[in-house]
Amino acid sequence: MSGEISIKGLSKVYRTDDSETVAIKDFNLEIKEGELIAIVGPSGCGKTTLLRCIAGLEEVTAGVISSGSKVFSEPGPDRGMVFQDFALFPWRTVRKNIEFGLEIAGMPKEQRKEKSDKYLALMGLTAFADAQVHELSGGMKQRVSIARALITHPDIILMDEPFGALDAQTRNIMQMELVKLLDKTDQTIVFITHSVDEAVFLADRIVVLTKRPAEIKEIVEVPWPRPRDRASPEFTALRKRILTELENENTLV
Amino acid sequence: MTDYFGFNYDKNNKHHRMIRQALLIVVSLYGFVLLWWIVSLLANSVAIPTPLETWDEFVRLLRDGDVTNYGASVWGYVGSSMTTFLEGFAVAFVIAVPLGLLLGYSKDLRDLTAPAIEVLRPIAPIAWAPILILSIDYVVGPVLVVAIGIFFPLLTNTIFGVQKIDRNLTDAAKTLGAKPYQIFYKVMVPSALPYVMNGVKVGLGVGWMCIIAAELYAPSLGGIGNFLSEQAFMGYWPSVYAALILIAAMGLITTGLAEYVHKIITRRMGME
Ligand SMILES: Nc1ncnc2c1ncn2[C@@H]1O[C@H](COP(=O)(O)OP(=O)(O)OP(=O)(O)O)[C@@H](O)[C@H]1O
Ligand SMILES: [Mg+2]
């Protein structure tokens, strides 16, 4: 395993013919192996851009993102990604979507089936193994896309608002499932969320970003073991503090 | 629920939808035949037979064959045209689809070929008929004319399909470790497929226009278009119109098939 991530001097500028958007500016962050990092920040501040840079999907304007001696300049199966809009393959069944990464790696069919059976069960999707993507609810699609990213066992998992499309109740269930899952693995997870509550519930550290261009406003350590009690005074206090911070950031726009 | 003359139409009821569809087809065809009848009566010309005369001739043609040609079976004519058509389609398909996928994939190649394609595309495929048939031969020529007709709609739709690919899907494949060639055949090809089928549908229509015209330049081919023009030259007008019915039927069968395949693919992809 080499799940640590080192981001040094990262800048990302989107250039079009007549405009320049500085999405990220001189960004530095060290993430330890097995850590669960939540990223919160005002809308449009550059969170997705940051994740795409780590995934190797964007060419960085300046800086280096690396893990040990390995520089992340290209996407690779060592970094799984859960996309904000699921990005499932509509011509594949649920099972074939989940097996995509294994198929790419050339794993034989029986082994693939064995693994996908496990992940289907884990995500409560066994009954929908042969369903087409368009037959699923938003929450199911979400679970398929998480299973698809997890099944290849990447060292690093990047999640872009993984529960953003879910209703509050499914969201809570998914958070609990993720907690159970995470405590069993040593994978590093970086996830973006708009929900401070979710961040405090799940993360080891919360990275609070400024408005665009994204810079780190504060890094909050959350030392409590999971699962956490949302009703506890510390929990509410911390949530409130971060919310206030974000609100200040938003009014500055 | 909509009330049609006391009949409660429920568009969520499958049977209601089927009845509606059947009624629409009947009414539409009935109206068409009626209009034809009126025109033929008003024109009062031998060149415009009534629907009834045409139908009688059609039935006779199927029963007795082409009496101007020792009773040769019209199925032979239909078969000949269908063969030319399918060969032309096959030629267009094996070239246009891979080329379209490639051009959709590579912007450099697309930009390089676009000027040439844009010059060639507006040329009516039928204009190629005399050139290809007289310069090559009576068998390969018509096949190529049909192929040209089908080629361009198929090519442009395939290119469009590849360009329409959701970038998130190719990105997702990349993060799952897919190499460029795997992205090509595991993501681009399947996601362009509905557009390819759309190109097939459009291409088939153009192809049928081409084949009849192509056969005019290849009289010894023995297709339905040859039969049609010979009958017209001899002034056997009901036979001409009976031939039109056969042509329409062949077109319906091929587009119906394409429609069916298209539907299966889009339904599987939830694109309806
Ligand atoms: N491909 C692109 N080309 C040009 N500008 C872009 C591109 N992608 C993002 N941007 C710009 O970069 C900035 C940051 O976008 P990004 O998607 O990273 O924000 P975000 O923090 O994820 O927002 P949200 O919370 O709404 O998802 C925005 O101003 C956006 O308009
Ligand atoms: Mg975003």
Image (cartoon, coloured by chain):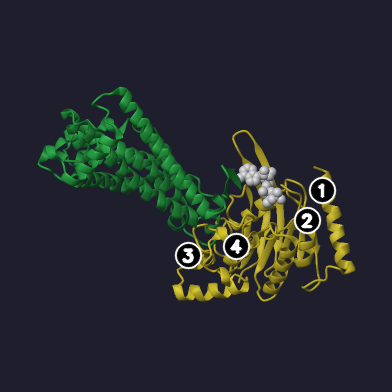
- Chain (green): B
Q: CA distance from mark 2 to mark 4?
A: 26 Å
Q: CA distance from mark 2 to mark 3?
A: 36 Å
Label placed on residue A208:
2
Q: Amino acid at mark 2?
A: Val
Identify the residue position indicated by label 3 in the image. Answer: A104
Say which element carries label 4: helix
**Do badges 2 and 1 share one subunit?**
yes
- The answer to whether A34 appears left or right of B111 in the picture is right
Q: Are marks 2 and 1 in contact (CB under 8 Å)?
A: yes
Q: Nearer the N terminus, badge 2 or badge 4? A: 4
Label placed on residue A249:
1
Please, which chain is the residue tagged with disc 3 on? A
Q: In the image, residue B199 lies at what x, y percent?
A: 40, 44
Q: CA distance from mark 3 to mark 1?
A: 43 Å
Q: Residue at x 54, y 72 (%)?
A: A116
Q: Nearer the N terminus, badge 4 or badge 1? A: 4
**Do badges 2 and 3 share one subunit?**
yes
Label placed on residue A145:
4
Q: Amino acid at mark 1?
A: Glu
Q: Nearer the viewer, mark 2 or mark 4?
A: 4
Q: Front-most of A7 and B173?
A: B173
